[in-house]
Amino acid sequence: MKKLLAVAVLATSLYACGGGSKSNAPAADSLQVNPNADSTTATAEMYGEAITPDSAIAIGELAALMGDKKELAVKLTGEISAVCQKKGCWMEIKNPNGVAMRVTFKDYGFFMPKDASGRTAIMQGVAKVEETSIADLKEYAKDAGDNKAAIDAIKETKKELVFEANGVILN
């Protein structure tokens, strides 16, 4: 009887710790996808919610699309110019107007690889016009590896176009 009870406790413990049934689906933040289903294209990486590359607009078109709106749900594509070197918790996308747009990730639910600069991102989420605080600007500068003089030189808030992504495809 003791052996039977020990086996039951062991089996229950293994099941509760993940030893039971497992999903064969990979985690969304490490999913490898091929959006074009064409063997000649490189495999892309997907982070956050599953999205598709269709209907993505170039970041340079965003300002005109937003007009006077404070917020707009949209799918964008652009080249990554910087990634948070602390843990990948934000990235910046090159904009043809010369001002990079900061992208954060919904509920800190996923992060980008720190070496993603130079890659193309397709991201779905919400573009917003925000007033970024001095404290946040200094924290972003610190995360980017800026020197103390550059961080100390930040003295005023900044009104800027930002993006909160719920899903990203890296190519």
Image (cartoon, rainbow, N blue to C red):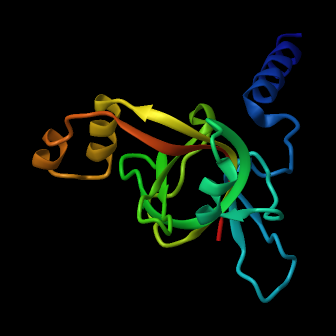
Image x and y of residue 82, in percent: 41, 60
In the rendered image, residue 61, in percent from the top left (x then y), is placed at: 64, 62
Residue 109 is at least partly visible in this image: yes
Left or right: 75 in relation to 113: right
Instruction: Establish if 167 lies above or below 109.
Output: below
Camera-side residue of 71 and 91: 71
For the image, the number of numbered tags is: 0
Q: Residue at x 85, y 13 (%)?
A: 5
Q: Quadrant of the C terminus?
A: bottom right
User: Residue at position x 72%, y 74% from top?
Assistant: 43
- Residue farthest to the front, as pictured: 68
Residue 29 x, y percent position in the rendering: 67, 49
Report the residue that reaches farthest toward the bottom: 40
- As rendered, which of 18 and 37 lies closer to the eye? 37
Q: Does residue 116 appear anywhere in the picture?
A: no
Location of residue 6 (image quadrant)? top right
The image quadrant of residue 83 is bottom left
